Amino acid sequence: MKITENERRFYNVKLLVGFFKDELKKQKIDKKEIIISVIGIFVGFIIKSLVNVSAHISNYFGIFIIEILIIAAGILIVRTIVWAAEKYLRRN
């Protein structure tokens, strides 16, 4: 029995849809992490605008890497603040 191209596409789509449905069921979305990440990105953008990396570096790739690191640092700062606040509130 030979499988036609249409049947192959149908089964491939069916497998992909089933895979993504299973993956979405497995992962619970943590709203707190999403909010922390969004606030961290905004903090990173604020820091990036204050630093003005492009005035100090002329290499575009270097500017790109530094800006990504600044935004990641903003996310890390917000996560650290939230972690410290949670730890402080649990203690009291």
Image (cartoon, grey):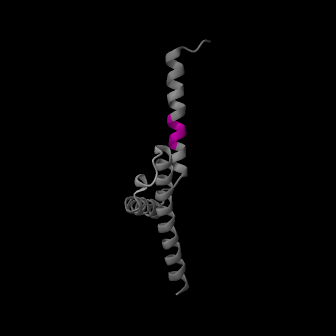
Q: Residue at x 46, y 57 (%)?
A: 71
Q: Quadrant of the N terminus?
A: top right
Q: Residue at x 54, y 45 (%)?
A: 23
Q: Residue at x 46, y 49 (%)?
A: 63
Q: Is residue 20 magenta?
A: yes
Where residue 6 appears, as percent x and y from the top left, is 49, 17
Res. 38 image quadrant: bottom left
Q: Which residues are magenta?
A: 17-21
Where residue 22 appears, as percent x and y from the top left, is 54, 44
Is 1 left, or right, of 31 in this rendering?
right
Q: Residue at x 55, y 51 (%)?
A: 26
Magenta-colored segment: predominant secondary structure = helix
Where residue 21 appears, as percent x and y from the top left, is 50, 42
Question: Furthest residue to the top?
Answer: 2
Question: Taking 90 as reference, is 22 above or below it?
Answer: above
Question: Taking 37 as reference, is 81 above or below it?
Answer: below
The total of numbered circles placed on residues is 0
Q: Is residue 43 magenta?
A: no
Question: Taking 6 as reference, is 90 above or below it?
Answer: below
The front one of 58 and 49 is: 58
